Amino acid sequence: MTDCLFCRMAAGEIKPNVVFEDDELLAFKDLHPQAPLHVLIIPKRHIANLNELNDELLGGRILTAAAVIAKQLGFADSGYRTVFNVNVDGGQTVPHLHLHLLAGRQMSWPPG
């Protein structure tokens, strides 16, 4: 999708601050971090949101990547939060599936 910001990142047209990449996923630091660690994990193929995800293996790979990244960056033991925002009322601002990985500060509940 040529007008999708995250598709352009996955294609290499825009260079994000990458922390993880494999054949199916790209993870990079958020431009507007909400925690000391704020990474977005996206599939390289365009999927609009969690409602459109019909690949259980890809969903599992996204979650597993979050755990791997948290461990590699030293946040696994202290804790972290993962969040999928879905559509406007869910807080999704980029219409491409992405998981937020947040760590490095105490998280409150409810999230807001």
Image (cartoon, rainbow, N blue to C red):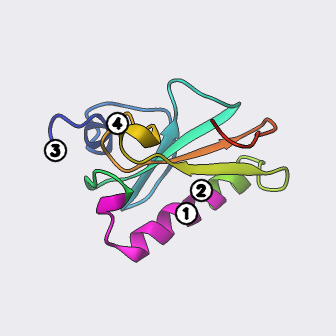
- When asked about the image quadrant of residue 58, the answer is bottom left
Q: N-terminal of the two: label 2 or label 3?
A: 3
Task: Identify residue for label 1.
Answer: 63
Element class at badge 1: helix
Name the residue tied to disc 3. 1
Q: Residue at x 50, y 25 (%)?
A: 31
Q: Position of residue 30 (x, y in %)?
A: 52, 32
Q: Which mark is residue 66?
A: 2
Dot 3 amino acid type = Met
Frontmost residue, 13 versus 7: 7
Residue type at numbered disc 2:
Ala
* Label 1–label 2 contact, CB within 8 A: yes
Q: Of the two numbered discs 1 and 4 on the same chain, state the one appearing first in sequence.
A: 1
- How many residues crowd around disc 2 within 10 Å: few (fewer than 14), some, or many (20 or more)? many
- Mark 2 and mark 3: span between their CA atoms? 25 Å
Q: Is residue 46 magenta?
A: no
Magenta residues, start to end: 51-67
Mark 1 vs mark 4, CA separation in Å: 19 Å
Residue 87 percent location from the top left of the image:
36, 44
Whichever of callouts 2 and 4 sits on the residue coming sooner in the sequence is 2
Mark 1 closeness class: few <14, some 14–19, many ≥20 residues within 10 Å: some
**Which residue lies under the disc numbered 4?**
94
The one nearer the camera, 83 or 36, is 83
Q: In the visual, does 96 lie left or right of 57?
A: left
Gap between marks 4 and 3 measured at Cα: 13 Å
Q: Does 60 lie within the magenta span? A: yes
**Picture quadrant of residue 110:** top right
Q: CA distance from mark 2 to mark 4?
A: 19 Å
